[in-house]
Image (tube, helix red, strand yellow):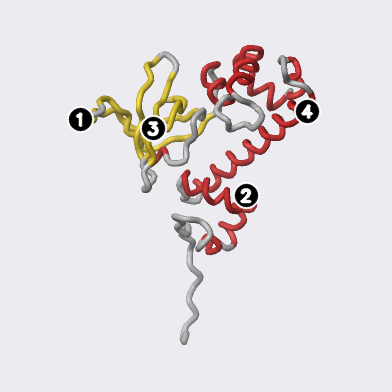
Amino acid sequence: MEASVEQLVYVRDDEYTVARMSADGEPDFVATGRALAGVQPGETLRLFGEWGRHARHGRRFAVSGCERVTPSSVRAIRAYLGSGLIRGIGPKLAYAIVDHFGEATLKVIDGEPERLTEVVNIGPQRQGQIVQAWQEQKAIAALMVTLQGLGVSPLLAAKIHQVFGKDAEEVLATDPYQLIGRVRGHRVPHRRPHRAARGGA
């Protein structure tokens, strides 16, 4: 199913995460699992797993895997923009932007950003800030996908990006041992070892 992260309820040291989720046409529900590590309020996820029932907390969705997807519904887009992930857009401005552009909001920001000035309280300066923040967020999202493809968990990927920024992918590809001592909770991704020289000391 596809659902938006409304709130992080609990995150354990081992990355086990409990989140309150919402999906169009469904009552809000709770999703759990380490696969949710690193997700943020406002993000829309494609969840894989199964329903279960906790003896104390009731019905829950146990997540075995998840993928970040572009929000498509008005509610999901409003939550995404108002979550703080895009600098320069708070909840009130997010509501105004989505109220004006509807389901086309993200397409406008990405492809026709000059139209943002159609919204009240968005002048050229704020429009420029929003566009810059949007491009940065897109770059981070793409990098997170690459890092997870290398076997790095979402939470650890976020930590690696925080330390190395746009150079994270190159660091992992050429010298992953740079992570040692710089990124808490690191585990150097498995790489095929070079053939050992015979007759070594």
Comparing marks 4 and 1, which lies closer to the viewer? 4
Quarter of the image that includes the N terminus: top left
- The mark that comes first in sequence, 3 or 2, is 3
Residue 164 drawn at (x, y percent): 60, 53
Q: Which mark is residue 165?
A: 2
Residue 125 drawn at (x, y percent): 78, 28
Q: Report how far apart the C-alphas of labels 3 and 4 lie in the structure.
A: 36 Å
Q: Observer-nearest residue: 48 or 90?
A: 90
Bin the neighbour count of mark 1 within 10 Å (Cα to Cα): few under 14, some 14-19, many 20 and up: few
Comparing marks 4 and 2, which lies closer to the viewer? 4
Comparing marks 1 and 3, which lies closer to the viewer? 3
Q: Report how far apart the C-alphas of labels 4 and 1 lie in the structure.
A: 53 Å
- The mark that comes first in sequence, 1 or 3, is 3
Q: Which residue is mark 3?
A: 9
- The mark that comes first in sequence, 4 or 2, is 4
Based on the displayed image, in which of its 4 quarters is residue 127 positioned?
top right
Q: Report how far apart the C-alphas of labels 2 and 1 lie in the structure.
A: 42 Å
- The mark that comes first in sequence, 4 or 1, is 1
Mark 1 and mark 3 in contact? Answer it, CB < 8 Å. no
Q: Amino acid at mark 3?
A: Val
Residue 78 drawn at (x, y percent): 56, 20
Q: Which residue is mark 1?
A: 55
Q: Amino acid at mark 1?
A: Ala
Q: Report how far apart the C-alphas of labels 4 and 2 lie in the structure.
A: 25 Å
